[in-house]
Amino acid sequence: MTPNRVQRGATKKRRVSLALLIVPIVLVAIGVAILLAMRGGTVPIIGGGDEPAPPFDFIVKPATAISTAPDADEATLSASADEVAQEITPMIDDLYTNAYLDPSNWRHDDYEEVFATFAPDAAATAEQSVETLTLGATAGDVFDTVDPGKSKLSYQVLFDPDGAPETAVVSVIFRATAERKDGTFLAIVSEGEFFLRQVDGWKITAFDVTRDDHEAQPPSPSASPSA
Amino acid sequence: MSTHPARRRAALLVALVGAWVAGSALGATPPARHASAAPLFQLEPAHAEYVPVLDGSKPIYVLVIGSDARPDQAIDSQRADSLHILSINPAEHRASLVGIPRDSYVEIPGQGQNKINAALFYGGPDLVVQTVEQLTGLKMDYWAMTGFASFEQMVDDVDGLVVDVPFAMNDEDSRAFFDPGVQRLDGDDALAFARDRHDLPAGDFGRSENQGRLMVAALAQLKKEFNQDPARLLAWVASFVRNGTTTLSLDEVLDLAFTGTAINANKVENIVLPGGEGMIGGLSVVTLNQESLDTISKDLADDGLLKKANVPPSPNEQLLGG
């Protein structure tokens, strides 16, 4: 049966109403997705989930050896302390990369790799301090990008009376700049000490770390690491 | 002209999405956050058959022995002229310090009755531990020992100790010449402060309390320096290991030092076992007050801490104006 004029009119009116409702929603959704994609946000429907972490290495100062033997050879211990520093530094580089810089971690609140650096007892406490030791559980909702800044490590290494390294204290100053999704910037500063001992390889057995973030100005366009 | 309802809805949606995006990024800079973790302690038993509980639920007892060995003498075969039980309650971050007068006339296992300081000469630190354990009924977890020269060096290695000298001291024998007040003592001065007894009315009792005062000052300073720079712990540990004698491994010294950084030095009860001086067989000795000894030992046994009610009067009360 052919619909009469009144029925056709009603159907047409419903189609127009639905179109008026759906089309703007779809357009807005696409617009938001494009906007987010342009600003580096994660939009699963258009990919972008495999962003690499920015390259990062701490600047390392010469290590200080602390002897427990009254007649230790200071030069030998000093060289050993530098070796310990060389051994531990890649671990601390990775720790901070995993905690602050790798988007595949902070976008998804996945910091499991961070806590693998800690000895079991310290790891339990570290996991309760995720907001201090990492970019944070909600970082993926807040930030678009995080770029490392000039960051430094210094070492003090305690040697046993036989000259074997026993404990290393790593003093850390880590700096990064995070851009929020609203275009503002946050200077991230993590400062403190990590105590490491040989527990199935060097592991963090104690730590004392402070986060002291503050608002930051957008980076100058001319500023670059080589500038 | 009225706005079309669908456009209004779309505008509202854009506004909501915009607000959500913006809202998630807005907000004040978070306040500074701080995280730290230090191992409470992990202890090596002083006795092969005895394993202390490691979870902080049990107090730790350390016998601190000061040998009167001079620089050219072995510190473990002289007399123990300074004896203190340091009992630590890790769970409460508190400690007590009990001085044992060196002339206390006690039973030394295998040696009969004698002054307690002779135990070191007869059997080294192990016999001193046995003697103190028999006297108090407390099981020592560790002992630590130092002599004159090593004590001086230890203090110098940590750049001196800040001590609140409680009263004027003028003693030619020990070379203790101090005005009262807070001052930083180098190793030489700290040793003089620890040795002075001739110008103290209670003699060795007063000296023992002052030795405890030095230990409390060291605890306070360790905590303060650790809070300012945690790496300073290594300097303290290294100083102790270089200049002291202990059964502990370096790992254990570190753990104990960590535990020390958590102690509130202001709440450490520093006492000396009370007793009376007398002569036995031509020896000038101290007869400990048995009732006080029993009360204090029993009080320490449960949680390592002394109740105020069981704190005896200071032997330096007269000088302190108490």
Image: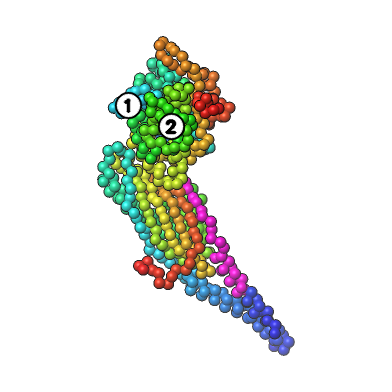
Which of the 4 image quadrants contains residue B308? top right
Q: How many C-alpha atoms fall within 10 Å of the one at disc 1: few (<14), some, or many (≥20)?
A: few
Residue designated by label 2: B178
- At 46% across and 17% down in the image, what residue appears? B286
**Viewer-closest of A51 and B264:** B264
- At 49% across and 31% down in the image, what residue appears? B166
**Quadrant position of the N terminus of chain B in the picture:** bottom right
**Quadrant position of the C terminus of chain B in the picture:** top right
Q: Earlier in the sequence, mark 1 or mark 2?
A: 1
Segment tinted magenta in the rendering? B13-41
Residue designated by label 1: B70
* Vertical comparison of A7 with B167: above or below: below
Parent chain of label 2: B
- At 47% across and 56% down in the image, what residue appears? A134
Parent chain of label 1: B
Kindly state the secondary structure of the residue where label 2 is placed. Answer: strand
Residues behind callouts 1 and 2 on a single chain:
yes
- Residue B298: image location, x then y, percent: 53, 25
Instruction: Describe residue B23's horizontal placement relative to residue B275 as left or right.
Output: right
Instruction: Describe residue B224's horizontal placement relative to residue B4 as left or right.
Output: left
Q: Is residue A54 visible?
A: yes
Query: Is B24 within the magenta?
Result: yes
Residue A83 is labelled as none
- Residue A173: image location, x then y, percent: 41, 55
- Residue B290: image location, x then y, percent: 52, 18
**Viewer-closest of A113 and A211:** A211
Instruction: Describe residue A222's horizontal placement relative to residue B55 as left or right.
Output: left
Amino acid residing under circle 1: Arg
Q: What's the distance in space between the residues labelled 1 and 2, CA to CA?
A: 24 Å
